Image (cartoon, helix red, strand yellow):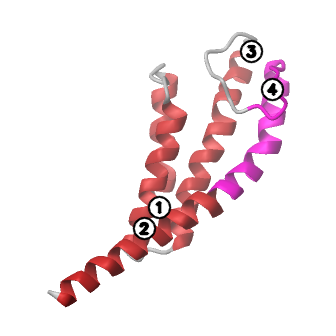
């Protein structure tokens, strides 16, 4: 559960320091790996899903919030856009605050849940293999 807070916080620092090339994809990838580890360590699917939820929500909300606070139309981020066109900074933030939680919930259930189940399956397979040898 610490990773649910620490991972987006770390990504925020990297984003503000302008080390953001491929940061969103890397953030989601690491969160799915953590969800898999949560399943393997029997921490539960909920804890893995929360990590994925926080990462996807960060991807949708944090970059537009920084663009809004800077007030710039030309920003260096490309948040996921449902309609495919760029709005003003306030419009971007409102759109992402609307769409972000829905996408994060869907991603948490799909990616977090499947990764957690995969972690449980790997752990059970290893235990079965050790019992057979």
Does 45 appear in magenta? no
Residue 40 position within the rendered picture, expressed as x and y whole percent measured from the top left:
37, 71
Closest to the observer: 72 or 96?
Answer: 96
Q: Which mark is residue 71?
A: 3
Residue corresponding to mark 1: 35
Between marks 3 and 1 in the image, the one whose residue lies nearer the viewer: 1
| Residue drawn at x 32%, y 78% as measured from the top left | 125
- Give the image location of residue 14, x and y in percent: 45, 28
Q: Secondary structure at mark 4?
A: loop
Could you classify mark 3 by the number of other residues whose Cα lies within 10 Å: few (under 14), some (14-19), or many (20 or more)? few
Give the distance between the C-alpha atoms of the residues marked 3 and 4, in whole angstroms.
20 Å
Going from N to C along the chain, the mark reached first, 1 or 4, is: 1
N-terminal-most mark, 3 or 1: 1
The rendered magenta stretch, by its main secondary structure, is classed as helix
Of marks 3 and 4, the one in the foreground:
4
**What residue did someone put label 4 on?**
84
Classify 15 as above or below 29: above
Q: Which residues are magenta?
A: 81-107
Q: Which residue corresponds to mark 2?
A: 38
CB-based contact (under 8 Å), mark 2 and mark 1: yes
Closest to the camera, between mark 4 and mark 2, is: 4
**Residue at image coords 27%, 83%:** 127
- Answer with left or right where residue 83 lies relative to residue 56: right
Regarding mark 1 in the picture, which secondary structure is present there?
Answer: helix
Spot occupied by residue 120 in the image (x, y as percentages of width and height): 42, 75
Q: Earlier in the sequence, mark 3 or mark 2?
A: 2
Say which element carries label 3: loop
């Amino acid at each position: 559960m610490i990773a649910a807070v620490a991972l987006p916080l770390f990504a925020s620092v990297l984003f503000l320091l302008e080390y953001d090339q491929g940061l969103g994809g890397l953030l989601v990838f690491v969160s799915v790996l953590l969800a898999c580890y949560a399943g393997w360590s029997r921490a539960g699917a909920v804890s893995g899903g929360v990590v994925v939820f926080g990462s996807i929500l960060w991807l949708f909300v944090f970059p537009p919030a920084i663009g809004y606070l800077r007030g710039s139309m030309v920003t260096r981020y490309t948040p996921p856009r449902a309609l495919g066109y760029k709005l003003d900074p306030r419009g971007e933030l409102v759109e992402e605050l609307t769409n972000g939680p829905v996408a994060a919930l869907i991603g948490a259930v799909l990616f977090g849940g499947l990764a957690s189940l995969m972690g449980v399956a790997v752990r059970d397979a290893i235990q079965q293999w050790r019992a057979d040898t």
